[in-house]
Amino acid sequence: MLNCFVCMPTVFVLNGPNLNLLGTREPEVYGRTTLADVQQLCQTRCAAAGLQLVFRQSNHEGDLVDSIHEAIALQQQGALAGLVINAGAYTHTSVALHDALKALAAYKIELHISNTFAREAFRHHSYLSPAVDAVMAGLGVAGYGLAIDAIAQRAA
Ligand code: CA2
């Protein structure tokens, strides 16, 4: 799968709108861990598995599409282990993210901190789910580490 023998395969972890507020508001839904803490958790998990981490957050749909295009370029060089995406509210609205994920031929995980199915009806539909390999919801921020572990296992 990986052509790159000297460099470490990369995991992309993408975060969508308002996730920069993690840990500062709505702790009853999202907990008290900040996004910087989540990045550290992902960094530790990737280092343990010999993977390189690209961790990003954006409030702009096009930025997230651009990041997926970067992942596609890396995949084409054989240097991508997988991608984790918490697209926030764009999960429930974005055909653009669906199309971009469809174009990425790598192991892809859609992640939600909360159990979206136990919340408002408008959070029950995801445009991303048909375009990814796996969906995780309701595991809190621990889900990020578990998603990286799943990617690492597949890449090994
Ligand atoms: O549960 C998740 O991870 C979500 O993707 C989070 C999104 C929400 O729109 C999805 O339905 C489910 C919202 C992210 C906003 O994050 C905040 C965190 C703290 C305070 C305010 C917003």
Image: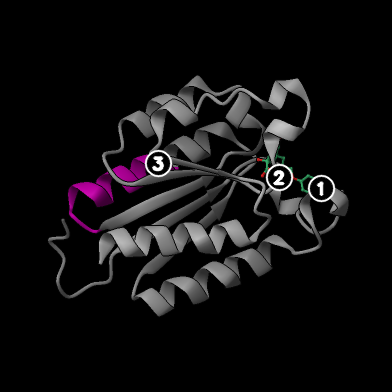
Q: What is the quadrant of residue 125 in the picture? A: top right
Asked if ligand 1 lies within 8 A of label 1, the reply is: yes
> On the picture, is 88 further left or further right than 106?
right
| As drawn, 35 above or below 50 | above
Residue range corresponding to the magenta coloring: 67-79
- Is 75 within the magenta? yes
Task: Between residue 139 and residue 97, name the one nearer to us.
Answer: 139
Instruction: Work out whether mark 1 precedes mark 2 in sequence or the reverse, and give the earlier one.
Output: 1
Q: Where is residue 139 in the image (x, y as percent from the top left)?
A: 65, 53
- Residue at (23%, 72%) from the top-left corner? 7
Q: What element carries label 1?
A: helix
Question: Which residue matches tag 2?
Answer: 114
Element type at mark 3: helix
| Quadrant location, ligand no. 1 | top right
Please say whether residue 2 is visible from this viewpoint: yes
User: Can you say which quadrant of the picture contains the C terminus?
Assistant: bottom left
Looking at the image, how many numbered discs can be counted on the residues?
3
Q: Mark 1 points at which residue?
A: 29
Q: Is residue 26 magenta?
A: no
Return the residue at label 3.
68
